[in-house]
Image (cartoon, grey):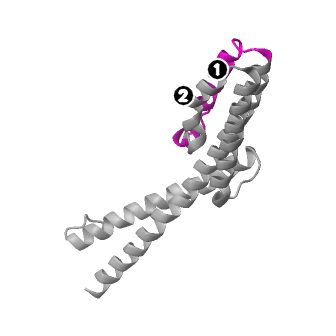
Amino acid sequence: GPRLPDGWLEGTLATLFAVVAGSGIVGLALSRRLPKRLSRRGEEVIFERIPAFRARLRNEAETLVAESASAAQSSTICDFYARRLAAFFAAPRNVAQHLLASNRGLFALLAEIDERRRYLSETERAYADSLRELVIRKDDLDFHFALQAALKGWLFVHAPLTFVLLNVSLVLLVL
């Protein structure tokens, strides 16, 4: 009948089995839900090309900010970019929120842009609107990064654990 493992090898095997089964269930859930969410938001992006797209968006944003400073003779957008948006464009952001299907980070950032927009001149507003569109595009890119990284990362957890489980099973079989 069923019993609890009483040796260290049996305990290791039981623990590994539970962990592999759990990671398999997590992987099944991820592989069923995340591709649907990926197809509903934005265009399809190859995971390996995301860093290049991120760099291109950052360059566009920095060019836009530099143009706004010279065209409007004001540093308002430059200051906001340096204080709030430079880090956003530099690396993936809101990864956990994207995995949990939350847009809170994006909405907070867009609200900050909209709040400052009313204090800008007409020239600066046009640049702020363009910058707002770049923020939305960058958030879509971060969304794809987060979900695709979860799908790829799960495999790098599940496959080695399965390999270890099979090896421990073989050791137990030989003993």
42 in relation to 72, above or below: below
* Residue type, mark 1 in image: Thr
Q: Outermost residue, top direction?
A: 119
Which quadrant of the structure image shows residue 163? bottom left
Q: Position of residue 50 (x, y in %)?
A: 65, 53
Which three-letter amino acid code belongs to the residue tagged 2? Arg
Identified at 56% across, 45% down, the residue is 91
Where residue 13 appears, x then y in whole percent?
A: 31, 70
Q: Is residue 15 left or right of residue 56?
A: left
Pick the quarter of the image with the C terminus.
bottom left
Query: Where does the magenta region start and end?
Result: 95-122
Q: Is residue 22 visible?
A: yes
Residue at (55, 54) in percent of width and height = 150
Asked if the magenta segment contains residue 16, the reply would be no
Q: Secondary structure at mark 1?
A: helix
Residue shown at 29% from the left, 87% from the top: 174
Furthest residue in direction bottom, as rendered: 174
Residue to which mark 2 is pinned: 83
Indicate whether residue 109 is drawn in magenta.
yes
- Near-viewer residue (1 or 128): 128
Is 173 located above or below residue 118 in the figure?
below
Q: Nearer the viewer, residue 73 or 13?
A: 73
Q: Is residue 140 visible?
A: no
Name the spot of residue 137 as percent of width and height, x first: 71, 40
- Disc 1 marks which residue? 76
- Judge by depth and name the residue closer to the eye, 4 or 126: 126
- Tell me the residue at 65%/49% (across/down): 55
